[in-house]
Image (tube, rainbow, N blue to C red):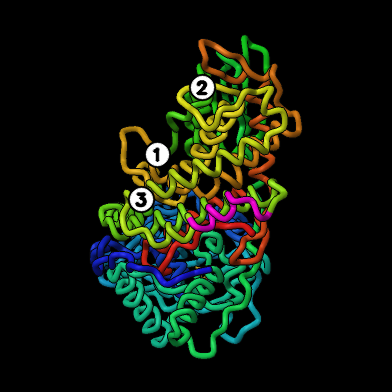
Amino acid sequence: MISRPHWSAPAKPAGAFPLTEQDLIPVRMLNEFAYCPRLGYLEWVQGEWAENLETKQGTFGHRNVDKPDRKNIPAVTEDHEQAASAPDEVEAQNDPFESPIHARSITLSSDEDGILAKLDLLELSGKQATPVDYKRGAVPEIPEGAWEPERVQICAQGLILRANGYECTEGVIYYIASRRRVVIPLTEGLVSRTRELIAQFRAAAASGICPPPMEDSPKCPRCSLVGICLPDETNLLLHQLEFLDGGEPRTEGFSPAAPRKLLPARHNALPMYIQHQGAFIGKSGDRVTVKLKSKELASVRLLDVSQVCVFGNVMFSAHAIKELTLRNVPIVHLTYGGWFHSMTTGLSHKNVELRIQQYRVADNPGASLSIAKQLIAGKIKNSRTLLRRHLGDREAPVLRHLAEYYKRVQRAESAETLLGLEGMAAKEYFAAFFTLLAGQQEFDVNGRNRRPPRDPVNAVLSFVYSLLTKELTITLNSVGFDPMLGFFHRPRYGRPSLALDLAEEYRPLIADSVTLTAFNNGEVNRDSFIERAGAVAMTDAGRRSVIAAFERRMDTEVTHPIFGYKISYRRILEVQSRLLARHLLGEIPEYPSFVTR
Ligand code: SF4
């Protein structure tokens, strides 16, 4: 259920992260903007990027032309033709294009049009220059010979060559799958359309407002950013809110269909956990290796690793660190006991715009409270669902009490009231939760306790909460947030407050559920724990069992309550984090919490 928000995301001032006239638009981005204005904005202004099969095929198709050659290309001068023909300066190429000069991977720009391009191939004959752009697909069966974004891109390259003194009357698109050249004349109409798009792109970037997603477009499933853009999801949420508000639909006659299934439903790469003290992590070819005293314990393809989690004292080679960070595979550091304390990653996500807006909202008590209420309401509802499924008594008072707390949370008018309601709801919830554990007498459970945990159930709960916080820190970081600044948990030195905020909704669904499974299925038992001076910790084997249960849960596919498709819990964390980003950036009026039925 989505209700009308009590606040609006603080509007970004136009050009909150302004791109200036000096920022040249890469013509590859102009191609994306012509394909979909939102795509161009997401990639150029927000620095988003994601690979899909088509982008990988494109990279593979460009593998030769992306290698710059060392050829000397003469600048255009009066005696250019003479210079160009000098045998010592340039070398005629014996290739399919039979042009006097072929040069690969040349970067040029035009200040006049404010654009920049890396030309795949430049054909030069005297002052006459022809850009050649390689495309992975086949020649499209359309009269123009190429789609508009590609024609605009090649035209922009031609304009750059003109600005550098060359004569350029046409460009060429070489379609790799068809092995055919298509000549694109630089007509007045194409030049004026190209300049129009450049102006529109620059205006969109300066406005600081991301263009809206397309509606039910066949372009979206092919778009590599579909999982970041969330076009169907954003449109559906907007439509629901407009409908509830009694307003006019954003587009007349538009009625959003159920969102198309988000692919992939789960990630193929998985986390790697290393608990062996003194282990050494290295890189060998395309694999991560784990050794202990020269004995190889594991060797895993880098492609299959999404994160490397190490407990206690584990060492890394410089090569391994470099390769993992370059591939955006975070290295997660936990204490030997399982407390998540730090992370090694590559440079921060480029989406500065999102972080600026996150800080603005965190500094606005009303805006922060509105998001915090959604998160805590979601947590209470999910806690109630877990109890309803396991208690076997639909009339249990705790269910009624949690339903009341849920309503009171939505009416909370201050952060302090919300904190109090969350605490009271948690107390009632845990009193019932501990009764669900098989053999609870054996484990001497006395309610929720921590720092340090004083019984096995609390030891497992604390460990799984730590794993969940680690998971959300990684996800938020990859989406472009600063995980340390939250809206419910106030900032504290070294505390990933935003990860803890988002974790609230998933504690019952993931962490508490894993704990129940681990105990009730006998995956952990007395031998999985050790007790020291009243504090209870897990053994290596106990931690291994809990990690296995946690990973199974993260990989479980669940139906998204609003969008109706099934994706793994790990993907849910990502989708929800992206929805929070869409909300902060002003695209959807409310963050929709994740609640199961
Ligand atoms: S998913 Fe669709 S709306 Fe979103 S950027 Fe790609 S093409 Fe544009």
Mark found first going from the N terminus, 1 or 2: 2
Percent of width and height locating residue 230 = 53, 65
Report the front residue among 142 and 436: 436
Q: How many labels does the image show?
A: 3
Looking at the picture, does residue 205 appear above or below residue 347? below
- SS at badge 2: strand
Magenta region? 394-404
Residue picked out by circle 2: 316
- SS at badge 1: loop
Q: Is residue 339 shown in magenta?
A: no
In 3D space, how far apart are the residues under numbered discs 1 and 2 (Cα atoms)? 25 Å
Residue picked out by circle 3: 487
How crowded pointer 1 is (Cα within 10 Å; few <14, some 14-19, many 20+) is rated as many
Looking at the picture, does residue 239 appear above or below residue 562? below
Residue drawn at the location 26% of the way across and 53% of the way down: 363
Comparing marks 3 and 1, which lies closer to the viewer?
Answer: 3
Q: For the view shown, which residue lies furthest in the right direction? A: 521
Report the front residue among 350 and 528: 528
How crowded pointer 2 is (Cα within 10 Å; few <14, some 14-19, many 20+) is rated as some
